[in-house]
Image (cartoon, rainbow, N blue to C red):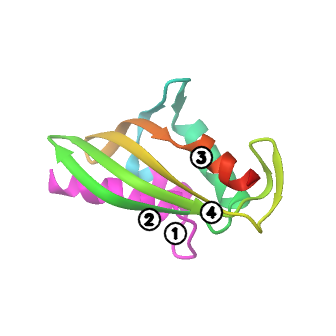
Amino acid sequence: MENSKEIVKAFYTDCLTVNEKADPATVMEKIFANDFQSINAKETKDKATISEQIMFFWKLIPDLKWVPEEILQDGNRIIVRSTATGSPKGNFMGMILDGSKSFKIMSIDIHTVENEQIKKTYHQEEWTTAIAQLKG
């Protein structure tokens, strides 16, 4: 079970955070179960959809960092409070940006790990905060 925290941590360090050492597509293929679900209040995304979204973020926000601030575990559920920062370049949530403005938001995720893979993630991010910061 302790390995579950490391599996989840790799999601933040090697998938969500842009870095030269990681290939997020390879990492996601390994750490996400084939029937993975990413769930928020609006929708549920499958493994392929969330993988495409993360690869898009790597291009749109080349300095994206997603830092786990707190990782808690309850059985096979891993709860992560994290901070995301970045400076988008391009069309970000209806705004055309050149990378000169940045955002800092908090996110809360609850990951379920089964068979050494993330099977399900419930998540909430402060994208309205990011929009306000980028407009300001």
Disc 2 to disc 1: CB gap under 8 Å: yes
User: Tag 2's secondary structure?
Assistant: helix
Query: CA–CA distance between discs 3 and 4?
Result: 13 Å
- Front one among 68 and 20: 68
> On residue 13, which mark appears?
2
Residue beneath label 4, please? 86
Query: CA–CA distance between discs 2 and 4?
Result: 14 Å
Residue beneath label 1, please? 22
Residue 94 place in picture, x, y as percent: 80, 41
Q: Type of residue at label 2? A: Thr
Residue 104 place in picture, x, y as percent: 56, 58
- Disc with the residue nearer the chain's start (3 vs 2): 2
Q: Type of residue at label 1? A: Ala
User: Tag 1's secondary structure?
Assistant: loop
Residue at (16% x, 56% y) in the render:
2
Q: Nearer the viewer, mark 1 or mark 3?
A: 3
- The quarter holding residue 114 reads top left
- Front one among 93 and 6: 93
Q: Which residues are magenta?
A: 1-29
- The quarter holding residue 133 reads bottom right
Residue at (60% x, 50% y) in the render:
54
Residue 102 place in picture, x, y as percent: 67, 63
Query: CA–CA distance between discs 3 and 2?
Result: 23 Å
Query: CA–CA distance between discs 1 and 4?
Result: 18 Å
